[in-house]
Image (cartoon, rainbow, N blue to C red):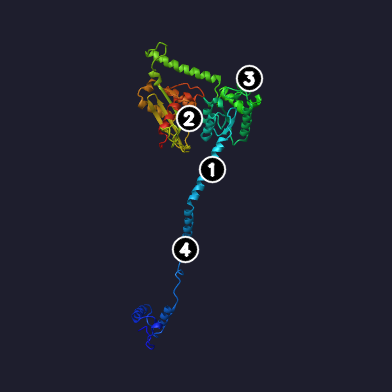
């Protein structure tokens, strides 16, 4: 198929193409537009393409590329402007920097000089950390420092009260979360600043005078449970001043009374003393009989083997299925920089059993436990004594025929008439035990405690 119309003669001006080039175009046209059945559609398409106007080069450019081209053009323009004025900009920056330094030098030169003598600076939070360091730094500048501490016994308070700066620091108690403490601290700060006649550690003479110290000492001797606010009210001074007189001047400390299980009467005390003297006399008499020597002071050396070894002591105790580790058991070696270990409180388990143990100077003779729900009564205790007698016969041959001295407390099953009859039947001696004297029972402080510490964490 030829691109040249066969019906019309060739016109060079109209076609503006030579035959070889037209035939090349014809081959490309046949590949792009295959011939149709009517043979006219592809030709019209080719004529439309050949006669259409050339496309706009920027018609197919995406918006993002257009924005990039625009920003590049703007950047180029700005760069050209800066390059043209670079020396001017550097000159402006240098002048501004020089002016800032000059202004700072002028301020330092005309800065008001403050004389620290007689000036007080109040700083809170001086127990430790930033407050403590600030107080020491301001003190080094020559100012008088009023340091507010939450606790007078804190490391920071003790350090500020120590020499060599003791005359330049006044420590006051302050709890910022307590309104009463804040008001009391404000009053004390006013008193410190208004009082010009100071001595010693910089304290007010009117508050810590000798007369006030003596009066506070007399009040405390009359009533050991007197409160600080009551002392301050009686002397008409601040509570913080009363606190200083009591703790710093007089050296008193607030301690709790020691708890004791029972208040002993004079009769109880005399009975305890008589029993202890009798036991000591028997021990020394037996030593003298058996030929033991004494030292220059008359104190006998050694122990009476026949007397002490004849004593069999016993008691009951509760045994928990698992005993938590105590603080003493969890002690570890730490370096000064090591973190402090934490131990959480653990409650003892509810499951426990009652255990009975009898022992002498050579070891344990009998140990037994009760069944759940079973209690110690007279009949049960006599059964335990039968087992104890059999254990002594097996483990201590000959002691039953010699003598057995039984030591137990004054519990009801131990002092019952049936129990006393059993002991008289076999000729056992009862070691006297004064009332309300648990410290005379060796099992309480020689057996139960160490045993629970060493083996209490093991399952029973």
Say which of marks 1 and 4 sits in front. 1
**Label 1, label 3: how many angstroms apart (C-alpha)?**
65 Å
**Label 4, label 2: how many angstroms apart (C-alpha)?**
104 Å
Which residue is more in the foreground, 306 or 221? 221
Task: State which tag comes first along the sequence, 1 or 4.
Answer: 4
Q: Which mark is residue 99?
A: 1
- Give the quarter of the image for residue 426: top left
Q: Which mark is residue 378?
A: 2
The residue under label 4 is 64
- Give the quarter of the image for residue 220: top right
- Give the quarter of the image for residue 393: top left
Badge 2 element: helix
The residue under label 3 is 211
Residue 254: where, in percent of width, then height? 56, 26
Say which of marks 3 and 4 sits in front. 4
Examine the rendered structure and indicate whether residue 269 appears above or below residue 74: above
Which residue is more in the foreground, 385 or 37? 37
The residue under the point 37% across, 80% down is 17
Say which of marks 1 and 3 sits in front. 1
């Amino acid at each position: 198929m030829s691109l040249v119309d066969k019906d019309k003669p060739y016109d060079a001006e109209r076609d503006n193409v030579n035959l070889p080039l037209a035939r090349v175009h014809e081959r490309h046209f046949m590949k792009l537009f295959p011939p149709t059945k009517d043979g006219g559609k592809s030709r019209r398409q080719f004529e439309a393409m050949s006669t259409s106007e050339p496309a706009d080069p920027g018609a197919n450019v995406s918006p993002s590329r257009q924005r990039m081209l625009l920003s590049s053009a703007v950047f180029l323009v700005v760069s050209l402007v800066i390059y043209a004025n670079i020396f001017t900009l550097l000159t402006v920056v240098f002048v501004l920097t020089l002016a800032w330094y000059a202004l700072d030098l002028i301020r330092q030169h005309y800065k008001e000089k403050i004389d620290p003598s007689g000036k007080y600076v109040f700083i809170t939070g001086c127990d430790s950390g930033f407050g403590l360091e600030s107080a020491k730094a301001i003190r080094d500048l020559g100012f008088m420092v009023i340091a507010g501490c939450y606790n007078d016994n804190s490391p920071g308070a003790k350090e500020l009260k120590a020499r060599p700066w003791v005359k330049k620091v006044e420590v006051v108690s302050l709890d910022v979360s307590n309104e009463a403490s804040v008001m009391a601290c404000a009053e004390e700060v006013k008193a410190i600043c208004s009082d010009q006649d100071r001595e010693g550690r910089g304290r007010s003479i009117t508050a810590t005078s000798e007369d006030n110290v003596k009066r506070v000492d007399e009040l405390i001797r009359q009533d050991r449970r007197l409160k600080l606010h009551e002392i301050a009210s009686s002397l008409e001074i601040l509570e913080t001043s009363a606190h200083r007189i009591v703790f710093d001047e007089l050296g008193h400390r607030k301690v709790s009374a020691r708890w004791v299980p029972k208040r002993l009467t004079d009769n109880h005390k005399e009975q305890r003393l008589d029993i202890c003297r009798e036991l000591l006399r028997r021990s020394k008499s037996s030593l003298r009989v058996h030929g033991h020597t004494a030292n220059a002071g008359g104190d006998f050396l050694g122990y009476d083997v026949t007397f002490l070894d004849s004593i069999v002591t016993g008691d009951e105790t509760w045994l928990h299925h698992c005993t938590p580790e105590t603080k003493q058991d969890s002690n570890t070696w730490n370096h000064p920089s090591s973190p402090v270990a934490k131990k959480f409180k653990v409650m003892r388990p509810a499951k426990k059993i009652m255990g009975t143990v009898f022992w002498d100077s050579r070891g344990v003779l009998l140990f037994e436990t009760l069944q759940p729900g079973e209690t110690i009564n007279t009949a049960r205790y006599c059964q335990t004594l039968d087992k104890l007698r059999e254990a002594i016969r097996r483990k201590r041959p000959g002691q039953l025929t010699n003598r057995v001295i039984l030591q137990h407390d004054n519990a009801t099953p131990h002092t019952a008439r049936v129990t006393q009859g059993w002991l008289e039947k076999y000729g056992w001696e009862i070691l006297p035990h004064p009332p309300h004297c648990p410290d005379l029972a060796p099992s309480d402080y020689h057996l139960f405690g160490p045993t629970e510490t060493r083996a209490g964490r093991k399952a029973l």
